Amino acid sequence: MAEKQRYFIELSYDGSNYHGWQVQPNALTVQQLLDEALSTVLRQSIETTGCGRTDTGVHATQFYAHFDLKSIVNSELSMDNPVKNIHHSPLTIDSRGLNAVLPKDIAIKRIIPVHHDAHARFDATQRSYEYHIHFEKDPFKVNRSWELRDKPDIALMNKAAAIMMEYTDFSCFSKSNTQTFTNNCKITKAEWVEQDGGLVFHISADRFLRNMVRAIVGTLIAIGRKEMGPAAIKQIIESKNRSKAGTSVPACGLYLTEVKYPYL
C-alpha cells in the first residue's frame, strides 16, 4: 500500500457564486472545485475535509481543509510538475498550479504538511467571524455586505453581546434538525465596531452551530432597533427555542475570518 502524507490547505474565497463550501448534488460549491483542481494538478483522486461548512453566499478570508496524498517521487518543481520529494521528506506542493486552474474567486494561500491524524475540523481550537453592514447604497458592497436603511443603537447591541458570553448553550440560535451532539459553545469575543460607513460584528468561539452567527446578528439588530431591551437576550438564550430569537440576516455580510490550531 502506498504511503500517504496529510496536508492542510489554507484558502480564501468569495462565496457569492457558490452554494456554500460542502459538496452537494446539483449545486456548485467551493469544495467541489477545490477537489477537482487538486485531483487534476496532483494527478490522483483527492477528497478534502473542511474546517467547517459555510452556507450559500457566505465568504471566507481564511479557511482550512485537509487531504491525503499518496507518495510521489519527483525531482523538478514547476507549474507543469507541482510536487517535489526531497530525500523522502513530505512533498512540497506549489500552490501556483492550483491557483491557475481555480476560478478567480477562490485563492490558495499555502499548503502545509501535517501529522497523519491532524484534522481540519476537529482540531480547530477557535473560529472567528465578521458580519458587515453598511447604510448607504454602494455598488462595490453588493453581495459583500448587508445594506440597512437605519442605523441601530450600537451601545445596546454591545450590551446584549456581552451578556451572551455568560452562557454556553446556544440552542436558540441553531438551525433545527442538525446532527450535533451538543449545542454548547464558548464565545470569547462578541463586539460591534463602527467601520467604513457601517458596522462590523466580530465574534469568536471554540465552535459554532449551523446558522448561529446570522441568528445572533439578527437578534442583536432587533435589540439595536429597540424592539426589545438588551436583557431580553437572557430569556432568549435560556428558552433554548429558535423561534424566540431574531430572524437570520442575509448571508452576504458574513465572513469566516480566522481558524486557529495548536500546531499551526
Image (cartoon, rainbow, N blue to C red):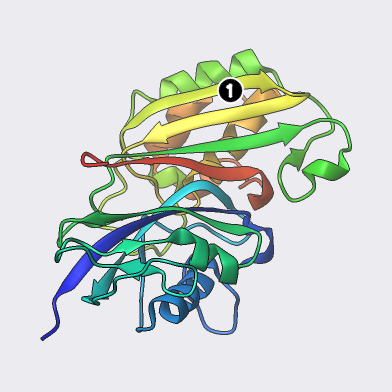
Residue 1 appears in the picture as rendered: yes
Q: Residue furthest left?
A: 1
Residue 47, quarter of picture: bottom left
- Residue 80 in picture, x, y percent from top left: 48, 75
Looking at the rendered structure, the number of numbered marks drawn on it comes to 1
Q: Is residue 179 left or right of residue 3?
A: right
Residue 215, quarter of picture: top right
Q: Is residue 183 left or right of residue 6?
A: right
The residue that mark 1 highlights is 192
- Secondary structure under the numbered disc 1 in the rendered image: strand
Q: Is residue 187 left or right of residue 223?
A: left
Nearest to the observer: residue 222 or residue 179: 179
Instruction: Give the residue displayed 61% in from the left and 47% down from the top.
Output: 248
Query: Around disc 1, counting alpha carbons within 10 Å, would you say few (fewer than 14), some (14 to 19), or many (20 or more)?
Result: many
Q: Is residue 46 left or right of residue 24?
A: left
Residue 20 appears in the picture as rendered: no
Instruction: Give the residue displayed 36% in from the left and 35% down from the top.
Output: 205
Q: Residue furthest top?
A: 155
- Residue 126 in picture, x, y percent from top left: 33, 38
Relative vertical location of residue 19 with respect to residue 263 in this rendering, above or below: below
- Residue 56 in picture, x, y percent from top left: 60, 62
